[in-house]
Image (cartoon, grey):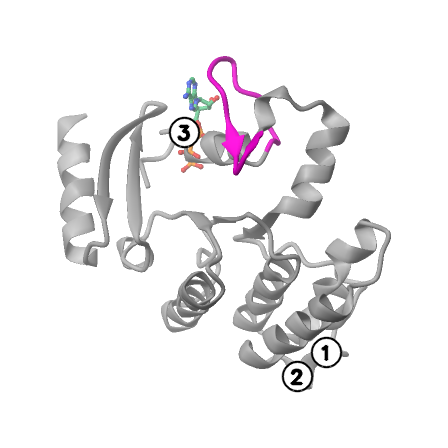
Amino acid sequence: MGASGSGKSTLMHIMAGLDSATSGRVWLGDTEITRLDDDQLTLLRRRRVGFVFQAFNLVPTLDVLGNIRLPFELDGREPNPDEAARIDRLVQTLGLEERLRHRPHELSGGQQQRVAIARALATQPDLILADEPTGNLDSRTGREVLAVLSAAARDYGQAIAMVTHDPVAASFADRIVFLADGRMVEERGRSSAEQISAIMLGMEAAR
Ligand SMILES: Nc1ncnc2c1ncn2[C@@H]1O[C@H](COP(=O)(O)OP(=O)(O)OP(=O)(O)O)[C@@H](O)[C@H]1O
């Protein structure tokens, strides 16, 4: 979390190997990504990082199943039996069974974001980066999407890093990091939306 311009997107892009750091080192698991070349970074993003964006970023010409299977398609392979079983489970858990042959424009915003989450989880990435994943959703649908993400963290042990402006969204996280002027300035464990709002207001007042 952090005010506009505090460096949230920059940090996320660096964590994903989309931008390079001017100094310091970045590790994803046991891989120092700041030492990788462009080709290696492309493979790392494809195989070890999942993305969920505010704008869903689904491929409009592919149906739901095609979108969920896209990371495998890009990797030039079919899901193996374990991965296919995982995709089936995800489709059921996310309530997408009836929608598999639908295109994104035939779905509600909440359903589209569920497809994006299924796609991000399908490859069991080391890390899912979620940039304002509820930014385009009404608050009730947003809560449902957050519940899905936190269930993925709990049930699959999936690591998720989320950028958000919304204290309610942040209250779903186990750890909350606050940025100001490109630096980490506060860090908390699980907190209520009220506690998070108070910290944000305090940071705003100190500016
Ligand atoms: N650690 C850093 N050191 C130097 N410059 C930084 C750092 N982090 C971010 N910046 C610069 O600060 C500016 C704003 O950063 P960024 O777009 O990441 O902010 P943001 O928090 O994502 O804002 P918004 O909420 O508006 O999307 C950019 O020009 C970026 O290059």
For residue 26: magenta? yes
The residue closer to the viewer here, 150 or 145, is 150
What amino acid is at disc 1? Leu
Q: Secondary structure at mark 2?
A: helix
State the residue position of label 2: 97
For the record, the magenta segment spans 17-31
Which numbered disc flags the more N-terminal residue, 3 or 2? 3
Rendered residue at 14%/27% (across/down): 206
Circles 2 and 1: CB distance less than 8 Å? yes
Q: Quadrant of the N terminus?
A: top left
Q: Total of numbered circles in the picture?
A: 3
Badge 1: residue crowd in 10 Å (few <14, some 14–19, many ≥20): some
- Where 108 sits versus 6, above or below? below
The residue closer to the viewer here, 163 or 36, is 36
Badge 3: residue crowd in 10 Å (few <14, some 14–19, many ≥20): some
State the residue position of label 3: 7
Residue 58 placement (x, y as % from top left): 68, 59
Rendered residue at 18%/33% (across/down): 203
The quarter of the rendering in which ligand 1 is drawn is top left
Rendered residue at 40%/69% (across/down): 147
Residue 186 placement (x, y as % from top left): 22, 34
Say if disc 3 is inside 8 Å of ligand 1.
yes
Residue 165 placement (x, y as % from top left): 34, 47
Say if disc 1 is inside 8 Å of ligand 1.
no
